[in-house]
Image (spheres, rainbow, N blue to C red):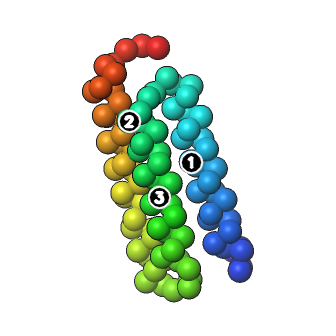
Amino acid sequence: LFGNADRAVIGALQLATVGLLVWVGARAGLQHGWYLATAVAAGLFGYQQWLIRDRGRDGCFRAFGNNVWVGFALFAGAGADFAIVGIAIR
């Protein structure tokens, strides 16, 4: 779909995702747990870029499967944030 620009487009979307996660955390009043999870997600996105560096089938599939860990990190970060700060309507 994007030809040789596929990695750049994926990277731009991943960067936008991290930016939106930071924005959501700020708007929701989340704290350290969320931002640590967002940093972990950003690191995993970097790892995914490394996996798809040669555009091989196996690397791309591994990067796709790695997104489970992005979701887990964000879930754990949100849970940790609420456990530490407490669930409150902000």
What residue is shown with label 1? 18
Asked where in the image residue 84 lies, by quadrant, the reply is: top left
| Image coordinates for residue 59, horizontal then vertical, percent | 46, 80
Which tag is nearer the camera, tag 1 or tag 2?
Answer: 2
Label 2 is placed on what type of residue?
Answer: Gly
19 or 57, which lies in front? Answer: 19
Q: Is residue 66 left or right of residue 14?
A: left
Q: Residue at (37%, 58%) from the top-left corner? A: 68
Q: In which quarter of the image is the N terminus?
A: bottom right
What residue is shown with label 2? 33
Decide: is 60 above or below 43: below
| Image coordinates for residue 32, horizontal then vertical, percent | 41, 33
Q: Residue at (31%, 34%) from the top-left corner? A: 79
Asked where in the image residue 62 lies, by quadrant, the reply is: bottom left
User: Which label belongs to residue 44?
Assistant: none
40 or 48, which lies in front? Answer: 40
Label 3 is placed on what type of residue?
Answer: Gly
What residue is shown with label 3? 43
Q: Distance between the residues labelled 1 and 2?
A: 15 Å
| In contact (CB < 8 Å): disc 3 and disc 1 | no
Q: How far apart are marks 3 and 1 (CA)?
A: 10 Å
Q: Is mark 1 on a helix, strand or loop?
A: helix
| Image coordinates for residue 39, horizontal then vertical, percent | 47, 48
Q: How crowded is mark 3: few (under 14 residues within 10 Å), some or many (20 or more)?
A: few
Decide: is 64 above or below 53: above
Q: Residue at (60%, 41%) from the top-left corner? A: 20
